[in-house]
Image (cartoon, rainbow, N blue to C red):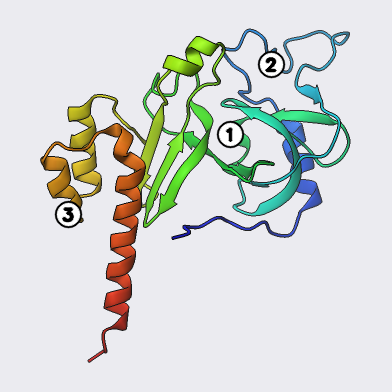
Amino acid sequence: MNYCRAAASVFCPCLLAALLLLAGRGVGQGRAAFIAPGSYDKYTRDPTLRYEPGSHPGTFRGLDGQWHPVQIAGWLTDRVYMNETGDYYRAFSPEDMTAFVDSYADTVVTVAGLPPGKLGRFSAVFGRQKFRGAGMQLVDVTDEARSLLDLLIMPHRLVIRKDAAGWLLVPRQKAAFRQLMLVLLADDPALVAELRAGRTGRRHLPRLLAQYADTRTTRFLQTAAQPRP
């Protein structure tokens, strides 16, 4: 089944301009290669700008909850480069928006509210949405790989939430993972039985969520089809 993807709404020209004035708030903290705005002299080229020829259409969801068209020139967990037009892109932080859709049509969302250290060096990060449906949302907030070794051995950092509640870090240990899933999927007897049998681990998470969503959707449709008294 196809579970939700928000559509872009009418563009408000002044919104991105307002974001430009706020750009860099908390952007790049902890990354030595990125100088925060205000910490460089007037003779230094603005490090929050990035030159990228060509157009990369996308959309972003502002703090007002509305979707707006924009151009995107790539992103990291702590910043995304955007503009309205031209070849120079400004860096925005996760605190400046709640989500964006990049040129690959992937939804990237802001994740915040976890205990210190759970998101690495940042209090809020961007993450690629891996699943959304039936109240469940799974996001990959893994840092960018800096070497081939990182790419091969670095485990993905996943966060999950149910019914738009607080984000939870998906444990890597099998016992802790099973315990969390027993709580989140408690209203699905078949999945609870499977989890208690010890046959599932973290690698099965996408299938578990898809099965959970299918079951809830089927249950809803069956209930809706019953004649009302």
- Residue labelled with disc 1: 95
Counting from the top left corner in percent of width and height, residue 45 is at: 85, 13
Element type at marker 2? loop
- Alpha-carbon span between mark 3 and mark 2: 50 Å
Residue visible at 77% across and 16% down in the picture = 47
Quadrant the C terminus occupies: bottom left
Instruction: Name the amino acid, label 1.
Output: Glu
Disc 3 target residue = 190
Q: Position of residue 133 (x, y in %)?
A: 41, 55
Residue at 42% of width from left, 33% of height from top? 113
On the image, the x and y values in percent for residue 41 come to 82, 8
Mark 2 and mark 1: span between their CA atoms? 15 Å
10 Å neighbourhood of mark 2: few (<14), some, or many (≥20)?
A: many
Q: Is residue 80 visible?
A: no
Camera-side mark, 1 or 3: 3
Residue picked out by circle 2: 36
